[in-house]
Image (tube, rainbow, N blue to C red):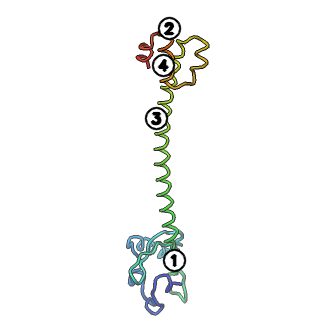
Amino acid sequence: AFERLLGFAGAEVLGRSGADIGKWVDPAAHATVLASLRVGQVVTGLETQFRDKAGRVIEAAYAGFTLEIAGEAHFVDMISDITLQKQARRDLEGQRAQLAALVAQRTSELTAAYRTLDEAARFNRNVTDHLPIGVQLIAAPWREDHCLRVAAALEAQGLCSAPVAKLVAKA
């Protein structure tokens, strides 16, 4: 498994440390792990990076412990390649950010559309409030330009209680 993951044959690494073969990308992480192992601690779930024989960086989950054999301490470590999982996590985070931006944009557009619709509704109410009751029922759902034409026609016939020019100025 070690050879398949990092590309080193067993004979190439026998008796050599991870630092000797350059497998640790982050020397500080390596030093922290060594310090923990030297005092008998078990290291689990450490996400770090290793370099394979060809120089490629591999995202990995590391676990290790110290084992004593015939009075001599040995480090035993396990490395799991999590490169694909880490890439999938980064992709997911990027998609979440894109979705959040899209939701914010659409929310802004809907808010602006609502304001425009609300202004038009207020204008229509302003115009229709000055029309006789029967005309109000018909005119209420009309667009602004229709309301203005009806109000102007009613004003011209003396049926409208407020001049259209005043209604347009209020809107």
Which numbered dot is residue 157? Answer: 2
- Counting residues from the start of the chain, the first of labels 1 and 2 encountered is 1
**Amino acid residing under circle 3:** Ala
- Counting residues from the start of the chain, the first of labels 3 and 2 encountered is 3
The residue sitting at 47% across, 53% down in the picture is 98
Cα distance, mark 1 to mark 4?
Answer: 79 Å
Which one is nearer the viewer's eye here, 89 or 42? 89
Cα distance, mark 1 to mark 3?
Answer: 53 Å
Crowding near the residue tagged with mark 3, few <14, some 14–19, many ≥20 C-alpha atoms within 10 Å:
few
- Asked whether disc 4 touches disc 3, contact meaning CB atoms under 8 Å apart, the reply is no
- Counting residues from the start of the chain, the first of labels 1 and 4 encountered is 1
- Asked whether disc 3 touches disc 2, contact meaning CB atoms under 8 Å apart, the reply is no
Q: Is residue 95 above or below residue 154?
A: below
**Amino acid residing under circle 2:** Gln
Q: Is residue 146 above or below residue 110?
A: above
Report which residue position mark 3 lands on: 112
**Amino acid residing under circle 1:** Ile
Cα distance, mark 4 to mark 3?
Answer: 27 Å
The residue sitting at 48% across, 75% down in the picture is 37
Which one is nearer the viewer's eye here, 18 or 65? 18
Report which residue position mark 4 lands on: 149
Cα distance, mark 3 to mark 2?
Answer: 38 Å
Q: Is residue 143 above or below residue 110?
A: above
- Counting residues from the start of the chain, the first of labels 2 and 4 encountered is 4
